[in-house]
Image (cartoon, helix red, strand yellow):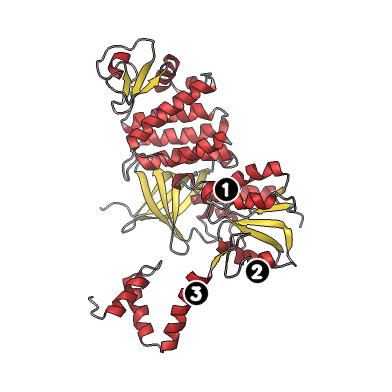
Amino acid sequence: MGTPRSYQTQAIIIKQTKLGEADKILTIYTPEFGKLKAVAKGACRPGSKLGGNVEPLTHSLMMLARGRNLDIVTQSQTIDGFLALKSDLWGMSCGLYLLELIDSFTVENNGNPPLFALLLDTLRRLCQTDSSEIVLRYFELHFLHYLGYRPQLHQCVICNSPLRPVVNSFSFSQGGILCPHCSEKEPESHPLSVDSLKILRLWQDCDYATAKRVKMKSELSSQLRQAMQGYIKYLLQREVKSIAWLEELRGS
Amino acid sequence: MMISCQPLARLIEAFSKLPGIGPKSAQRLAYYLLHRPGEEAEALAEAILALKEKIGLCSICFNITDCDPCPICQDKERDHSKICVVERPSDIPPLERTGKYKGVYHVLHGAVSPAQGIGPEELKTRGLLSRLQDGSVTEVILATNPNLEGETTAMYLRRMILPLGVRITRLARGLPFGADLEYADDATLGQALEDRREF
């Protein structure tokens, strides 16, 4: 017996590109197979049964048939279209940021069920909350954890000494915090206040219900944002493009 | 297959760069032209050259045109107080075909796509905002595509236009003719229900 010719999976649609006149190539994120590319035939036609069910930022139940190169989407039923997110410019942009992170960091055919669950929960949280900054930072920390880039926040990554409550610094290249002594040797590292470190430590190990209770001023919030996004940029070795857009929206 | 004849090889290579045309189709097209009368080839070559030489963008609406301003912007019969904003020049003919719109257009030449690094600066948004400054425009119809990029663009434009006090409308979203309710997505069906009308 070979592998079955078709299979069913949950999927979050990450992006789509047009293929020929009426088809689309979808990039989807699934729990069992990770990132996949699949063809949605005829999805651009107005009467298509796939049509709106294969738009990015949609959680769908999909039936796929194995193709020679790319698998083919035969059915797609929307489970959650995150409509609250799509009707709000800021919310939608946050959603697109998450999708870009997933797309940039994951490889095809590498299932990571906890990461899928995190993405799904985060999109739902963005639909409900006003404090999107916390949702995004919580996502970033746990996202990096599931990918194997969990930052070490409890002791100095060079000398292993426990961190004291002073301004330490976040070394992106070492993947963790440096004590003031070691950070002198690493001029590239990013200074991190005592409060910032406390919050990151809390978020790294607590559930979201606890994480969202944190109250912080905008200054602290932007400090955390810069630290996390700096680390992500270092890991990716390039800019995350949607960040520029989020910054533009913050400014206007 | 090696083509020893240089001009033919050049044409095949040029054809195969076109979208949707592979090496085999390119060969077929080239051989077809080889056997057609000279005038036909000349007409084709001329049409291609004219495309690049004569066509530019309208300085008002940024639609593609061979005269500036474009015929739509020049037309005094049209209602210049209404501007319909579209993503691409190819979106205008279908709107014109409906015969229901008598206003003018504005072509953005794309949509905001954060993941591809396309922001409003890369589009013709500034031109649109400057057209709204003198107060002669009373309505802006946002006719960007009803997908993620189009929605983002529409919401961004709404945010920019709102302070100017111009009426902003968006093309209705609903079920296309020939659709099947069973397969409609929630977003479309929900909107179709919300915007239902007297029958």
Q: Is residue B67 above or below residue A219?
A: below
Question: Which of disc 1 and disc 3 is earlier in sequence?
Answer: 3
| Helix, strand or loop under label 2 | helix
**What residue did someone put label 2 on?**
B71
The residue positioned 47% from the left and 33% from the top of the image is A121
**What residue did someone put label 1 on?**
B153
Do we see residue A218 in this rendering?
yes
Report x, y in % for residue A185: 27, 20
Q: Inspect the image, locate mark 3, and give the three-letter code of the amino acid beneath it.
A: Ala
Q: Inspect the image, locate mark 2, and give the three-letter code of the amino acid beneath it.
A: Pro
Callout 3: chain: B
Question: Is disc 2 surrounded by few (<14), some (14 to 19) or many (20+) residues within 10 Å?
Answer: few
In this rendering, would B181 be left or right of A237?
Answer: right
**What residue did someone put label 3 on?**
B50
In this rendering, would B116 be left or right of B76?
Answer: left
Report x, y in % for residue B39: 44, 87
